[in-house]
Image (spheres, coloured by chain):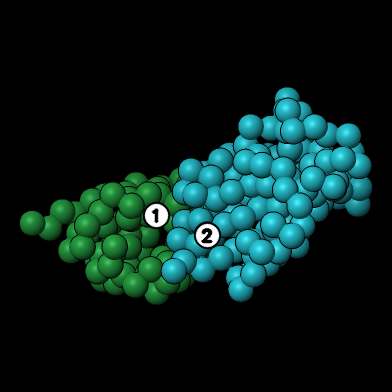
Chain colours: A cyan, B green
């Protein structure tokens, strides 16, 4: 049986979303079962419509250089990386409680999200595998 | 019959090459040879880790001035 990689995306800044994207895609390419659980600030980037590029406050002035470097190195966007991961079988779930708190309805979620689930489902899915909190 | 499949991942950043390899692996059969071309410096360690995890064999890793070539034999599907 394949190993499991579970990633909790808690942060909403683009640097951390990028890390989550890289590890999801790499995890799926390595043949792992990959589950991504999006909660709190992460959810701000998982609603329908254009994705905001939020930089962390302390590195805000490095935003343009980061974007330029990504373009130069042909690094894909975190969203494209998650799409690649999904294409290899990864699943993306939104935390139902956080969606409630932030007034995000099922139909507001980006189509990349497979379902809205609770913490118990995530814990059951991640049991026995690697878990990353980003 | 052994197929040799060329995967050209030159220019793609991590985790692009390993993803291209995983895709080609999906369409391969036991005995096939995959030849991955990449410019990402992580590709050597990444393909070694991938081969170990998936139970396949790295036959050769060749570093050329403009690219890294990794030859993989598919032993397991």
Q: State the residue at coordinates (73%, 28%).
A: A107
| Residue at position x 62%, y 41% in the image | A114
List the residue tagged with mark 1.
Answer: B22
- Which residue is farthest top? A49
Task: State whether residue B34 is above or below residue A107.
Answer: below
Q: Position of residue B17 (x, y in %)?
A: 44, 53
Figure quadrant of the N terminus of chain B = bottom left
Name the side, left or right, on which A54 lies relative to B76: right
Residue A60 at x, y percent in the picture: 87, 44
Question: Does dot 2 land on a helix, a strand or a loop?
Answer: strand
Mark 2 Cα shell of 10 Å, populated few (<14), some (14-19), many (≥20): many
**Chain letter of disc 1 in the image:** B
Label 1 close to label 2 by CB (< 8 Å): no
Mark yes or no: residue B6 visible: yes
For the residue carrying disc 1, how many other residues have a C-alpha within 10 Å: few (<14), some (14-19), or many (20+)? many
Where does label 2 land, which residue? A33
Could you tell me which secondary element the residue under label 1 belongs to?
Answer: helix
Determine which quarter of the picture holds residue B69: bottom left
């Amino acid at each position: 049986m394949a190993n499991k990689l579970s990633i909790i995306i808690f942060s909403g800044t683009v640097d951390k979303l990028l890390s989550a994207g890289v590890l999801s895609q790499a995890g799926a390419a390595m043949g792992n079962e990959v589950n991504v659980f999006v909660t709190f600030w992460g959810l701000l980037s998982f609603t329908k419509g254009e994705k905001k590029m939020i930089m962390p406050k302390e590195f805000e002035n490095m935003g343009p250089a980061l974007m330029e470097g990504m373009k130069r190195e042909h690094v894909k966007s975190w969203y494209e990386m998650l799409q690649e991961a999904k294409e290899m079988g990864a699943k993306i779930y939104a935390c139902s409680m956080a969606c409630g708190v932030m007034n995000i309805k099922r139909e507001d979620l980006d189509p990349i999200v497979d379902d809205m689930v609770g913490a118990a489902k995530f814990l059951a899915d991640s049991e026995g595998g690697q878990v990353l909190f980003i | 019959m052994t197929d040799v499949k060329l995967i050209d991942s030159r220019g793609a950043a991590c985790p692009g090459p390993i993803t291209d390899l995983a895709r080609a692996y999906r369409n391969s059969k036991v005995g096939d040879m995959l030849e991955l071309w990449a410019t990402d410096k992580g590709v050597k360690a990444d393909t070694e880790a991938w081969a170990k995890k998936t139970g396949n064999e790295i036959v050769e890793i060749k570093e050329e001035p403009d690219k890294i070539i990794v030859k993989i034999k598919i032993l397991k599907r």
